[in-house]
Image (spheres, helix red, strand yellow):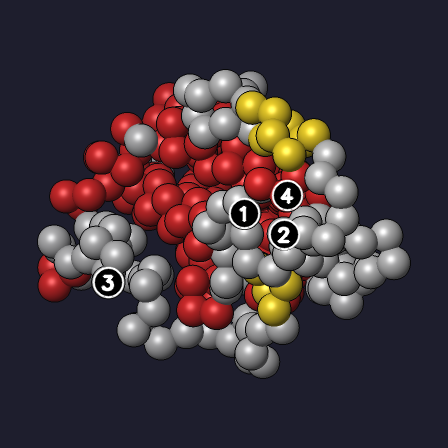
Amino acid sequence: MFHEAPSGYGATGDTSSRVARTTGDNDVGRYDSRRRPIVGDPAGEELMNRRRAQGLAAAALALLAAGGIALLSRGSDDDRPTAAPPSASSSPIPVLVPGRPGESAMVTDSDKVQLPAGTEYNTIDVTYVQMMIAHHEQAVRMADLAPGRAANAGVLGIAGRISAAQKPEIVALRSWLRDRGQPESDPKHDHATMPGMQSESEVTALAAAKGADFDRRFVAMMTEHHEGAQQMATDLLRGGADQRLSELANETAVEQVTEIRRMADLNVT
């Protein structure tokens, strides 16, 4: 179900947010109200990383399933996104309901469809997904420059992980928008001003760099880029309505904190 979100999306957050952009000793072992590891918790990051591949696949499939059911319930005369269940007054029709990860799909009558939790969303969710697609695309673009340019094996390895993780996330984010009848981008968004976005001239200079110069530029630019993505996740977690989308954003932010630490450990700056 679509909800109008409260105003103020995109404002920089305070330290009470569920995702922090900076970490310290006092953060170790802390959890949010849902018992999820807070970003910056070293004790939870290894577990989050091991669950990363399974979590991303399950979250993407769940998003597709929720969106598919929502589409079945949309009236042809209503252009607004909705997640209302099929009307009991209409004749039921056979529908295919995707199963959970590891389970088979099933066919049932439309009047028996139960919408899963997490199908509600608002303008903050939509804006986050639209902007994160462009944000991820730039990260992938920078990461894909590393082969043939990076001198440090650690830089090359981190770049490969970023590309491998964020490409399927872009696919899942696009599917989330498509299944809710939302456009992939909004002309009102200025992607160049998103937190952490690098200028076109900086990306061009990175592409022209080689060896140690490339390594230094890449670490500095990608660190700033990741920190920007954490700020965007903070905004989503503060005001978004789609619980599964928030969980996916939190897992992404946790992984990016780990990558920032790994890049700092390379000592190439």
Left or right, 246 with respect to 107, comes to: left
Label 4 residue SS: helix
Q: Which residue is mark 4?
A: 111
Which residue is label 3 attached to?
A: 33
Element under label 1?
loop
Picture residue at 50% right of the left edge, 56% below the top: 242
* Residue nearer the viewer, 61 or 36: 61
The image quarter in which residue 255 lies:
top left
The residue that label 1 is drawn on is 115
Q: Quadrant of residue 78?
A: bottom right
Residue type beneath disc 2? Pro
- Above or below, comparing residue 241 to residue 174 in the picture: below
Depth-wise, is mark 3 or mark 1 nearer the camera? 1
Circle nearer the viewer, 3 or 2: 2
Q: Amino acid at mark 4?
A: Asp
Image quarter (top left, top right, bottom left or bottom right) of the C terminus: top left
- Kindly indicate whether the residue at mark 1 contacts the one at mark 3 (C-beta within 8 angstroms): no
The residue at the point 15 percent across, 58 percent down is 30
Q: Quadrant of the N terminus?
A: bottom right
At 12% from the left and 59% from the top, the residue drawn is 25
Mark 3 touching mark 2, by CB under 8 A? no
Say which amino acid is labelled 3. Answer: Ser
Residue at mark 2: 85
The label nearer to you, 4 versus 2, is 4
- Of the two numbered discs 3 and 2 on the same chain, state the one appearing first in sequence: 3
Query: Under tag 3, what secondary structure?
Result: loop
Q: Are marks 2 and 1 in contact (CB under 8 Å)?
A: yes
Q: Amino acid at mark 1?
A: Leu
Q: Residue at x 55, y 58 (%)?
A: 120
Between marks 3 and 1, how big is the CA–CA gap?
A: 25 Å
